[in-house]
Image: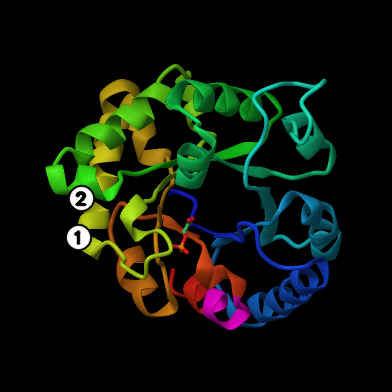
Amino acid sequence: MRNKIVAGNWKMNKTLEEAQALTSELIGMIADEVKGNVKVVLCTPFPYLHPVNQQLGSNKRISVGAQNCSEHDAGAYTGETSVSMLKSMNVPYVIIGHSERRQYFGEDGKLLATKVDKALAALLTPIFCCGEPLEIREKGTHEQLVKQQVEESLFHLSAEALKKVVIAYEPVWAIGTGKTATSQQAQDMHAVIRKHLASKYGAVAEEISILYGGSVKADNAKELFACADVDGGLVGGASLKSREFVEIVKAI
Ligand code: PGA
């Protein structure tokens, strides 16, 4: 049985006060309304990881996650945050390779492979993102590109290490655009990713949670999450409002 996960990616939004207000709303609503064993991850900006984690206390269902980490261990890298810093703050998850990091910060597959290694070595769970831009989808080479992204950053791992990774498929054309992939498009790509993992790792591929991301909303989450190979979501804009996010969590 694969883990069901709904992760909210807050990106660079909210003041500390707003972040804490959202967290306390989510703690209450999720305790009251969410059944089953879905895991909820709040990927907050770095400065809020510690206070939000304190607020969560020993909450069994909700955890925090970072949105990025450094590929370096420590030292003179102004503005960076290492995996050991995250570990020391009891942060269990880290997003690696979000398309905004790839696009605006020039992160490529090789660098992301290093970040994945660092995260795993610090016993963090990487949420590794992949996904194609619009022009690649229009050219029809999207499956090839996504397979390549997965291969470049994950295929050096042992099967034991791969089991600790969560993958998020996020078509770039669906991120923040309001244009969601259809559930068929999501299922097709998730199946392609799983088959590609199986070609190297065999049955282990069945154990990997693959999340869908890109304009997930309360009104489309149910259909997306009903797909056989979709194990949850990575949610941007809709994770900033408690009611909308909790409805997405409940859709799983
Ligand atoms: P969105 O973002 O839900 O606002 O499209 C998703 C993401 O970037 O992870």
- The image shows residue 244, relative to residue 4, as above or below, that is below
Percent across and percent down for residue 20 are 79, 70
- The image shows residue 94, relative to residue 23, as above or below, that is above
Secondary-structure class at tag 1: helix
**Dot 1, how many residues are within 10 Å of its Cα: few (below 14), some (14-19), or many (20+)?**
few
- The image shows residue 57, relative to residue 66, as above or below, that is below
Circles 2 and 1: CB atoms closer than 8 Å: yes
Q: Which mark is residue 184?
A: 1
Secondary-structure class at tag 2: helix
Q: Which mark is residue 188?
A: 2
Q: Is residue 209 left or right of residue 202?
A: right
**Dot 2, how many residues are within 10 Å of its Cα: few (below 14), some (14-19), or many (20+)?**
some
Q: Quadrant of the C terminus?
A: bottom left
Residue closer to the observer: 160 or 66: 66
* Residue type of the residue flagged with mark 1: Gln
Q: Which residues are magenta?
A: 241-246
At x 84% / y 37%, what residue is drawn? 88
